[in-house]
Image (cartoon, grey):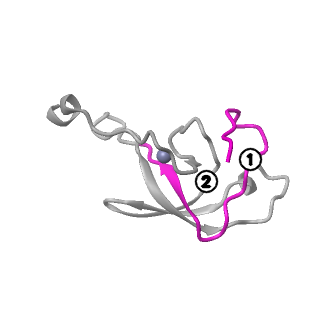
């Protein structure tokens, strides 16, 4: 699946029940960084003119609980978006863990 860089380009639709990555927002004070979370595609609504209809309904699996939301795809991995599985999921650095 070739990723597209533009958020406005037509994007692939995930299959119902597939697993993707949801990018968390992190905390405003920076205590928690935005990170990839596993998410299950819970629904794939029909595409309409409404921009929000372009995203699937996700059930994001966070360490602190589940999060349900219709989410737009962004391969640039902006917080609050989803993308297909990525190999470059950030890992905590020793400095970040000590801070
Ligand atoms: Zn990811």
Confirm or reject: label 1 Cβ below 8 Å from ligand 1.
Answer: no
Residue 32 among magenta residues: no
Disc on res. 71: 2
Dot 1: element: loop
- Label 1 crowd bin: few (<14), some (14–19), many (20+), radius 10 Å: some
> Which of the labelled discs sits on residue 66, or is there none?
none
The magenta span reads 1-25
Q: Main secondary structure of the magenta part?
A: loop
Q: Residue at x 53, y 46 (%)?
A: 80
Question: Is 24 left, or right, of 76 in this rendering?
Answer: left
Give the CA distance from mark 1 to mark 2: 13 Å
Give the mark nearer the N terminus: 1 vs 2.
Answer: 1
Which mark's residue is nearer the viewer, 1 or 2? 1
* 10 to the left or right of 15: right
The correct choice, above or below, for 41 with respect to 24 in the image is below
User: Residue 2: x, y in percent?
Assistant: 68, 42
User: Per the image, is 19 magenta?
Assistant: yes
Task: Tell me where residue 31 appears, x and y as whole percent.
Answer: 27, 37
- Quarter of the image for residue 58 reads bottom right
Q: Which mark is residue 11?
A: 1
Residue sitting at x 66%, y 40% = 3
């Amino acid at each position: 699946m070739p990723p597209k860089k533009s958020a406005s380009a037509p994007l692939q639709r995930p299959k119902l029940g597939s697993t993707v990555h949801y990018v968390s927002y992190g905390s405003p004070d920076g205590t928690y960084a935005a990170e990839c979370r596993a998410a299950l595609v819970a629904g794939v609504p029909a595409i309409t003119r409404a921009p929000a209809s372009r995203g699937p309904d996700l059930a994001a699996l966070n360490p602190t609980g589940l999060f349900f939301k219709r989410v737009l795809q962004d391969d640039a991995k902006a917080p609050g978006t989803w993308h297909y599985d990525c190999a470059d999921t950030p890992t905590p650095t020793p400095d970040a863990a000590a801070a």
